[in-house]
Amino acid sequence: MQIYLPIAEMPVSVMLVLGLGAAVGFVSGLFGIGGGFLMTPLLIFLGIPPATAVATQSAQIAASAMTSSLAAVRRRGIDMKLGAVLTAGGLVGTLLGVWLFAAARRAGQLDLIIVVSYVTLFTVVGSLMLAESLRDFWSARRGIVRLRRRAGAHPAFLGWPLRMRFPRSRLYASVIPIFGLSLCVGLVGALLGIGGGFIMVPALLYVFRVPTAVVIGTSQIQILAAALLAVILQSVLNGAVDVVLALILIVGGVFGAQFGTRAGRALRADVFRFLLAVLVLGVGLRFAIELVLRPSEPFSLSLPDSRR
Amino acid sequence: MTRGATLLVGLALMATGPARAERLVLSLSNHQVQISSTYTGTELTGFGVIERDAQTASRAGGFDVVITVRGPREAATVRRKEEFGPIWLNRGQQKFVAAPAFIGVLSSHPLSEIVDDTARRRLRLGLAAIVNAPEFTLDRGPEDEPYRAALVRLKSRDGLYVEDERGVGFVTDGFFRATIPLPATAPTGNYDVEAALFAGGALLARSQSSFELVKTGFEDRVTSAARERPLVYGIGTALISLAFGWVASVIFRRD
């Protein structure tokens, strides 16, 4: 069954988009990430204009994040205080990112910045996570217990001024690095058109040593706020949000996210970190290959954002 | 300028005497194509009649017709990836400030059999002649040629630039029909249709018509809401997301 998308100005198969929404929703619920970095390339591959793809998938992320947040609230897996600090930093970062986006476009280097950022970010973050997770597996096999939290073994910047207590996250740390992290995530997210959950989740896990259950719920709260802001900003600034496409993605996504959240609870923590590392590294390598391989069609056509 | 000149020549030819008295009448099956939620592209039919008066000498070679459809103009940029150290980057680019979003060229025979190369270029007949015309984009000598070719290649892949050398069929000697294939991705706006009549390599007459592609009903209301009240539209979409997220969590609540 085909349906015509009024803003994207093209027909799509309803079942195909429902399936995409469900698959990305599953991954999103499983790992507590937005899934934008998977959905955007898939939609562009279907022929949806890039501006519409980036803008519209924010609506689906908002819906999945709403469901996951409510589930996390019920099982008390949210640190509201930490979530508020992360959200505040994320909003400042988003505004900076939007400004940087426009500046790079004026300089004519936006494409380059996006591809290089994707490759660097995903391969570096993915490799770090994979190495950490493999070390975990290795020590477990040799029967060595690596303590995840050692007294006095915190990174020094957690002891900076403005220390704050986050009892739910078992964290007592300076707000400066936390605010800085969320600012960077918001900035990169706005620049690349992604939620940034895949940076936020490992950073909270490894750097701040927040318990896994709290990390997922808290990052969903921050993603929800960022995605809602993105939907409204994209509508006002670019007119690129397609409500029909959003509805199909949402219906597929909310179901996928439910099953993902359940599967996530059944996963062992070390397996969870390993799978997330493989996913992030895989996306980074895919972009790296695209950058290195001789393209079969070296030419590409781009139309103005005003029409699409 | 050139087109105006040819039109004048054509008019002059038509006015010179009874031997050149053909008249071309073109009519489209539809002057407004409506996009609804089930739209997946469409086909328009063009009909044409070649009118001759009693004194017109019959032509040995018969007639040929070329129909050219041009969609709304848009600014397009073609970029080329080039090797830069170990990686491939977009480096060169060529802007097409007002390229038609859709071009369809339908003819009764291959264009090379209808007119010679010089006339084809002068009259802008066929995709190659239209896109390679000097005014189509900034002329940079041999530099711009790969970009023009790439535009045709990329647009043809999506069915937005089409050329069919058997697209016009003669039902009788003086009556022809042609089917214009419009893909679903062709943008809304005005489409100009121009038919040109040839015999023995000479242009005899031209005729013009047009149609409009518009969104209707729900599609139209969504588009105008997004354009005229973007804040309301954005907040509405955000609320829909929240509502669906909440409904899903209620449906799936088991614990």
Image (tube, coloured by chain):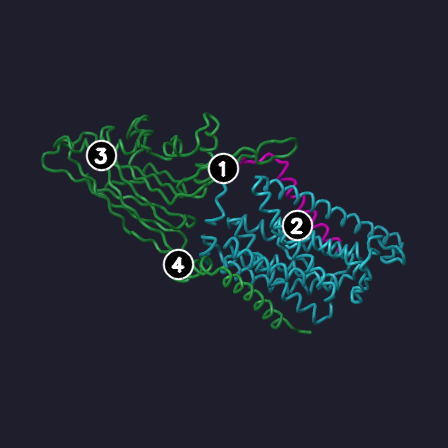
Chain colours: A cyan, B green
Residue B58 at x, y percent in the picture: 15, 32
Disc number for residue B36: 4
CA distance separating discs 4 and 1: 31 Å
Region rendered in magenta: A273-299
The chain letter under disc 4 is B
Residue B249 appears in the picture as rendered: yes
Counting from the top left corner in percent of width and height, residue B164 is at 35, 38
Answer whether labels 3 and 2 touch (C-beta < 8 Å). Answer: no
State the residue position of label 1: B78
The residues bearing labels 1 and 2 have C-alpha atoms spaced at a distance of: 27 Å
The lab-note entry on whether marks 3 and 1 share a chain reads: yes
Q: Main secondary structure of the magenta part?
A: helix
A129 relative to A193 in the view: left or right: right
Q: Amino acid at mark 1?
A: Val
Q: Secondary structure at mark 4?
A: loop
Q: Earlier in the sequence, mark 4 or mark 3?
A: 4
Closer to us: A248 or A103:
A103
The circle drawn on residue B6 is none
Query: Gap in Å between the C-alphas at discs 3 and 1?
Result: 38 Å
Residue beneath disc 3: B63
